[in-house]
Image (cartoon, grey):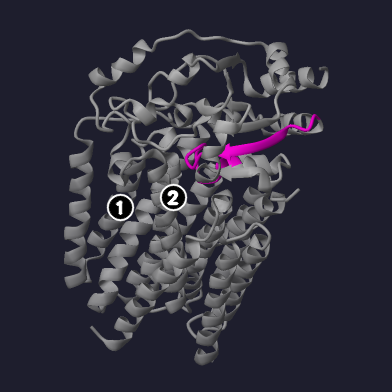
Amino acid sequence: MNTVIDITYLISSIFFIVGIKKLSSPKTARKGNLYAAIGMLLAIVVTLFAKQVLTYEWIIIGIIIGSAIGAIMAVRVKMTGMPQMVGMLNGFGGGASTLVALSEYYKISPHIPINTGVAIVLSLLIGGVTFTGSMIAFAKLQGWITGKVIKYPGQHPLNALLLLFILAAGTYVVINPASADLTLMITITSLILGILLVLPIGGADMPVAISLLNSYSGLAGATTGFVLGNSELIIAGSLVGASGIILTNIMCKGMNRSLMNVLLGGWESAGSSPAESTATDSIQGTVKSVDAEEAAMIFDVARSVIIVPGYGMAVAQAQHAIHELMIALEKRNIDVRFAIHPVAGRMPGHMNVLLAEANVPYDKLYALDDINNDFDNTDIALVVGANDVVNPAARHDKNSPIYGMPILNVDHAKTVIINKRSLNVGYAGIQNELFYGQNSLMYFGDAKDAITKLTHEIKNL
Amino acid sequence: MDANFLMLIYVFVLAIFVGFELITKVPPILHTPLMSGSNAISGITIIGALLSAGMKEYTISTTLGMIAVIFAMINVVGGFMVTDRMLKMFKKK
């Protein structure tokens, strides 16, 4: 029976790998997800036949409760709430790893080989940090905790101290496995560390935090694999760990910041002192604004439009209104495309999911590198609720905290229409010189209302 | 370090390489489903949870195992379902 189980784990791992491979194209992605789910089902079913599994009451209760909660969450969550959902799911994965490691500790203590001991400590640490860190990320994205950067004196030394304690206590436990109290202390300290690490991270840095927690949830699974000596956990965990690291890297590049800089919190530390960056406060030029009717007139003579959505679109739930606008424009034979900045929104791919929800075909969604040169021959760039990712200062103002960040070159379009509620600064806390540009027009208002009105006016042309 | 443990390290290192190869090919438009889908895969910890929850004698390990089953199943079922919901929406014109 053991051989059958092991071979089934191997088959299940292959399903995971093929499943992720199929995620590389929107055409096959749904099938890929199904493959991965089949792999998981195989692994679960065959584990029930393992010789260690002798009673089923607790298993059945656990499976029913867990599946029900998961299913309800998956069905009810709104697409705009997807970052919170992903954050929370990360957390449960990490939590499960911690619990399994702790359970295994109590099961085999005090006869724990060194290898297993190290794996248990690492599982407790990574799983614990993932669990509470993800829950804090969830609470921040949900608006239960402020999305602002939180700073307090001594936060970095404190975190370093906690980590040091975990490593020291961990070493002790590996050598003297009988110390159950210390093992529990390691668990609790890891949980506290997770809270303290994510709490300071600001809203717009969440794509990095969520990606990193995603990676941790995979690594936690892999370390649990070492605890149990199970290859499938290691394979699946490493795949997810790699995925999270790659996404984290893409997100950091999208902001031109190092991972450390993001984790330590805030743009302030991004290379320039606040005193220097005030230079951008004295931007030359005036702001021109238009109403819906005037904006519609500009679209009347346009042939090509690139729409640039940002977090403001998600907040206003304007994706459906934007889809309506797209249809109205296409009826007038205007070419409409979307330019998506890698860090637009609160998690990787956030804008794409919202636009897909609103039935915008995915072949109209372009990544930064694929569309950035096209702004030069585009009549209108329409910015909806984006700010820092379209600030030209990133290209030329060496004193700007966002200097060097890849931005969408909307100012290269013939006309830029910027829909925003006000001239307020974005996440980086700096003025946007785009708003004062020669070819820029501000179109003030809530994204959903404003775009709906604009569509109406365009239809009436 | 015994041979068995060394084997696990082999698996770990090679799987990370496979992961990097696979994931770099995922286009940015699918990054959210990639996260939620891979997330569901990380719920594979369910194996360990089941082994703990199904032990013969009732101990603290069993309780921890059962909570782990709940957590992992939320992750697995929620993750795969929500990923499917999202991927269903991605249509070409």
Q: Position of residue A391 (x, y in %)?
A: 44, 26
Residue A239 numbered mark, or none = none
Q: Which quarter of the figure is the C terminus of chain A placed in?
A: top right
Residue at 32% from the left image edge and 86% from the top image edge: B4
Choose between B71 and A270: the one closer to the eye.
A270
* Horizontal arrangement in the rendering, residue B50 relative to residue A121 (left or right): right
Residue stretch in magenta: A332-351
Query: Mark 2: which amino acid?
Result: Ser
Which residue occupies 31% across, 35% down?
Answer: A265
Q: Is the residue B25 above or below the residue A450 in the image? A: below
The circle on residue A190 is 1
For label 1, the crowd category at 10 Å Cα-Cα, with few meaning under 14, some 14 to 19 and many 20 or more, is: many
Q: Which of marks 1 and 2 is nearer the N terminus?
A: 1
In the image, residue A34 above or below residue A367: below
A362 to the left or right of B58: right
Query: Could you tell me which chain the residue with mark 1 belongs to?
Result: A
For label 2, the residue is: A211
Identify which residue, A432 or A172, lies in the foreground: A432
Which element is circle 1 on? helix
- Image quarter of residue A219: bottom left
What distance separates the C-alpha of mark 1 from that of mark 2? 19 Å
Which amino acid, mark 1? Ser
Label 2: which secondary element: helix
Q: Main secondary structure of the magenta part?
A: loop
Residue A159's x, y, as percent? 23, 44
Chain ID of residue with mark 2 = A
